[in-house]
Structures are given as C-alpha cells and as structure tokens.
C-alpha cells in the first residue's frame, strides 16, 4: 500500500525559506531553531519513510499585495513577468531535484508513473524506492495569457489550479471566471490538463460541468467542518463526484474541527478528525471513490495546526491505521490513500 499526496509546497519552500528537500525535516528544524520560520515538516526522506510514493509538488507565487503574504516570504510579484520568473525558478528546482537524486522522478508520462510505482511493489529498502513528483501550478498568475499554457505543458506542468484568490482568470472566492479564465479552460481541455478546483469560488467551480478534461480538488475539505468559501459545499462535492472527481483532504486543524482555535493544544485534533472528513465525503457521495489525501502538510502552518501525532510527512502513514480502525476495508484504504488520485493521474497523463 502507498500514499499519493496531492499537495506539498516543496519548491515554494525551497525558494522562500531556502529549504533542502533532501535533508530530514528534523535536520532542517535544527538549522532554523533560532528563527521564527514555520517548522519544516517534509523532506524526501520523511516522505519515503511515510510511503508517500507520489506527491503533487506545487508551483505557487504570491502577489505583493496579497493578504496571504507572510513576513517570512522573501519573494513576491508585482507583474505577470515577475510571477513567471518566480514560477520558472520553482519548476527548474523540481527538475534539478530529479536530475541530482536517483530517488526522485518527475511524472511527465504514463511510463514515468508506472516505473516509479514499480519500485514500491517489492520489499526493497526505502533507499531503493523512487518518489514521483507531479508538478501542479497553484494559481495561474504566471500565465500572462491562456496560450502560454502550452509552453508550461512542454516544460512539465501536468496539473493547473486557475486561481489562488483573485487574478486575471477568476474573481477569487466570490466571483466567476473572467473571459480570459474561460479561454484558459478551453486551452487546458485541449491538452487534457488535470483541472484543480481548489481555491475557486462556488460559482467558478461550477464550470467543472462543462470542462472537457479531467477534474479534481488537490486539497480542499468539506465545508461541513469549516464554514469558509475555501472549503467545498455539499453541492460542489456532489458535482465533483458526478464528474468522477476526487478531493484531497488536508491535515490542517482549522479545516478539521469547527471549534478549533490556534491557542488550543495540539492533542485537541487527532487523525480521527481527518477520518471524519473522509467519511463525510464517502457518506455524502455513497462511495469511497471521490476522496483522497491532499495534506498541505508544509503549508507554512504552526506545528500545533497539524493533528496530534502528525509531526512530519513520515507520520502520514498513521492515516492508514486510523481508516482501518474506523471500519474501512483494506481495498477502501488503498483507494483513499492512493488509488483514487492515481486514477485521475492516469486519465490525464500522456502516453510515453
């Protein structure tokens, strides 16, 4: 059994925080012990130990005027050209990681996916396994126009979330796609790019009904547990399921427990709360086929914002036991932790 995690910010954290993905999270923390940086929670070694065979690595840029901009972020953009350069650096970072590490492979084709997964089918040591990285653009701010989608596809992009708050393609959490946004969807569909609806408004996300390509939500929790437009309503979850989509549940305490407060002790939220969110989607849609993991474990949160016993990506394997203890079958757990996300990947990746 393996894990597919549909959201980690590997290159973003390398760019903004200077973090080395090849170093254990504990070693990164030790080097930053006198800083105010959010704690390191992921690395290649932590992911391999946690059996995270495939990870969606984001390309994310933040506008200088964005309310999401954090004091520890070194780089932001003013223009589309700035955004492009920041995103290109992150894309090139993923390429460097794959070129310099035998344990990393970029997932660009069906063949890449098959060969990476094959290393997890035996009892070989962790050092013999390969982690596949799928490049996901979180917000299309780096695209000055929809036609640039083809260039990014040629560079290795395989998943695109059009918006992270407001940009030229959508009006953020409250509005619809702009005309350029609808044009972007048409271009994406022509290349069979996997559309990520995370971060879209309810109105914009409804466009999934007309999108001709595959659809999913890399990291988005049910609104039932956190009443925010950042989370998916029951109606949108059902619409996503009707398109055979999958939503990745985050290991982020505010989205797992309505009454959670930053001052609460870490133990107040556990992995069973993550299972509650998974189970809610299963009960709502009547199947286990539309839910998975999109941890966002390295999303810049304080250590206490992750469920109890989830310290680094190596602990994501604890989700397996929690699902089994809830009564999910072994096959159900395989689908939730990996199989469902793999299905969407296989629908979207080109042959080769």
Image (cartoon, rainbow, N blue to C red):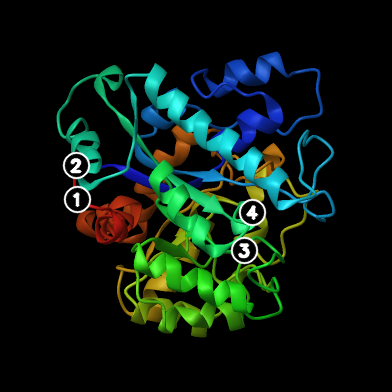
* Label 2 close to label 1 by CB (< 8 Å): yes
Mark 3 lies on a secondary structure that is: loop
N-term mark: 4 or 3: 3
Residue marked by disc 3: 163
Residue marked by disc 2: 111
Q: Position of residue 352 (x, y in %)?
A: 18, 44
Using the numbered discs, state the Cα–Cα distance from disc 3 to disc 1 in whole angstroms: 28 Å
Quick one: 263 or 75, which is closer to the camera?
Answer: 75
Left or right: residue 153 compared with residue 72: left
Q: Position of residue 14 (x, y in %)?
A: 61, 29
* Label 2 close to label 3 by CB (< 8 Å): no
Label 3: how many residues lie within 10 Å, few (<14), some (14-19) or many (20+)?
A: many
Residue marked by disc 1: 351
Left or right: residue 172 compared with residue 149: right
Q: Quadrant of residue 109?
A: top left
Quick one: 290 or 332, which is closer to the camera?
Answer: 290
N-term mark: 2 or 4: 2
Task: Identify which residue is drawn at 52% across, 17% down.
Answer: 23
Mark 2 lies on a secondary structure that is: helix
Left or right: residue 67 compared with residue 234: right
* Label 3 close to label 1 by CB (< 8 Å): no
Quick one: 145 or 30, which is closer to the camera?
Answer: 145
Using the numbered discs, state the Cα–Cα distance from disc 4 to disc 1 in whole angstroms: 39 Å
Residue marked by disc 4: 253
């Amino acid at each position: 059994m393996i894990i597919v995690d549909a959201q980690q910010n590997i290159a973003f954290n390398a760019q903004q925080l200077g973090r080395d993905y090849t170093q254990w999270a504990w070693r990164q923390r030790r080097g930053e012990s006198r800083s105010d940086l959010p704690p390191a929670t992921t690395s290649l070694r932590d992911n391999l130990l946690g059996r995270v065979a495939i990870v969606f690595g984001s390309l994310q840029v933040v506008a200088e005027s964005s309310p999401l901009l954090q004091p520890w972020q070194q780089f932001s953009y003013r223009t589309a050209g700035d955004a492009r350069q920041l995103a290109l650096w992150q894309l090139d970072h993923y390429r460097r990681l794959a070129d310099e590490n035998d344990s990393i492979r970029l997932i660009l084709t069906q063949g890449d996916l098959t060969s990476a997964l094959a290393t997890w089918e035996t009892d070989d040591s962790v050092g013999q396994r390969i982690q596949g990285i799928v490049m996901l653009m979180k917000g299309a701010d780096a695209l000055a126009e929809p036609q640039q989608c083809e260039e990014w596809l040629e560079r290795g992009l395989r998943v695109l979330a059009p918006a992270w708050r407001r940009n030229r393609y959508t009006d953020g959490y409250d509005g619809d796609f702009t005309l350029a946004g609808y044009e972007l969807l048409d271009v994406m569909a022509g290349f069979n790019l996997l559309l990520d609806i995370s971060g879209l408004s309810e109105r914009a996300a409804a466009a999934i009904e007309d999108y001709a390509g595959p659809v999913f939500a890399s990291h988005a929790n049910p609104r039932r547990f956190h009443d925010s437009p950042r989370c998916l309503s029951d109606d949108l979850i059902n619409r996503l399921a009707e398109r055979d989509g999958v939503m990745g549940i985050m290991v982020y305490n505010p989205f797992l427990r309505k009454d959670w407060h930053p001052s609460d002790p870490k133990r107040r939220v556990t992995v069973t709360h993550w299972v509650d969110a998974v189970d809610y989607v299963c009960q709502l849609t009547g199947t286990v086929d539309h839910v998975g993991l999109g941890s966002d474990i390295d999303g810049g949160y304080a250590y206490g914002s992750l469920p109890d016993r989830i310290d680094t990506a190596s602990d994501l394997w604890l989700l397996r036991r929690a699902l089994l203890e809830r009564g999910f079958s072994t096959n159900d757990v395989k689908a939730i932790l990996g199989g469902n996300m793999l299905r969407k990947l296989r629908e979207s990746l080109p042959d080769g």
